[in-house]
Amino acid sequence: FRYDGQKFRRFGLREGLPSADIQSIHETRDGVMSVGTRSGVALRKNSRFEVVNTGEPLEILGHSNIDSDDAGWVYISTTKGLIRIQPSSGGMPVQWIFHGSSRGVHVIRSGHVWAGCGQELCRIDLQTGRVSRFGSEAGVPAENWDSLLGDSKGSLWLRSTAKVYERTAAGKMIDRTDGLPRTQQPARRLAVTSSGEMLVPTQNGLGIREGE
């Protein structure tokens, strides 16, 4: 739905969306809107949507599965892997970064993309394209990391249905769950306030962690 100041207008299959089950919405800095659904990804073109042709059916399952960088690349976590597209290129060629289930994606302005990969955490170097995986040996619990978010200290926050972790700028993993209730699957989107408070939606209210 789009609100024009007076009423909502519905956008669905007739307007070009591949599914009416909307999972993720993201807008780039230059105003390109991407919509992730259970049946694929579409980009808004004026009053309609154009489906991104990936050559195979893709499912987006999560509310934090689309992000973009300063160059206009859009990163999309899908159940079959992490892809990226560049809408400004016209033809929108799809580039696969890695295959395998991916949940959650977050672009760090320093030049890295973080994404959940299986039940591990992946870091992609935007300059080299190298994908580094972090699992139990790096202190990352085996979870579906549905939501990822960076903060002003350089930490990366991770949210699954049961856990909240902070990965510090030095690479230390800290369990911040601290009695927080579980959340629905997939986990709801993390957010941070202008004063540095981390907001964690749960099934039993909103968890707010004040900056240290």
Image (cartoon, helix red, strand yellow):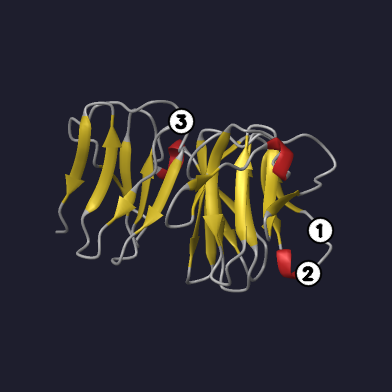
Left or right, residue 123 beside residue 199: right
In the rendered structure, the answer to whether residue 9 lies left or right of residue 80 reads left
Q: Mark 1 or mark 3, which has the lower sequence index?
A: 1
Q: Which disc is residue 127 wearing?
A: none
Residue 162, quarter of the rendered image: top left
Residue at image point 56% right, 51% down: 66
Q: Residue at x 73, y 39 (%)?
A: 14
Question: Which residue is identified by label 3?
Answer: 186
What's the amino acid at mark 1?
Pro
The image shows residue 1 at horizontal and vertical percentages of: 52, 44
Kindly state the secondary structure of the residue where label 1 is placed: loop
Q: Which mark is residue 93?
A: 1
Is residue 116 in view from this perspective? no
Give percent across and percent down for residue 129: 67, 62
Q: Amino acid at mark 2?
A: Ser
Q: Quadrant of residue 127?
A: bottom right
Q: Amino acid at mark 3?
A: Pro
Residue under numbered circle 2: 89
Query: Between 19 and 54, which is closer to the camera in this rendering?
Result: 19
Answer above or below: position of 6 versus 118: below
User: Which secondary structure, mark 2?
Assistant: helix
Q: Are marks 2 and 1 in contact (CB under 8 Å)?
A: yes
Along the line of sight, the residue nearer the viewer: 109 or 25: 25
Q: Position of residue 150 (x, y in %)?
A: 37, 58
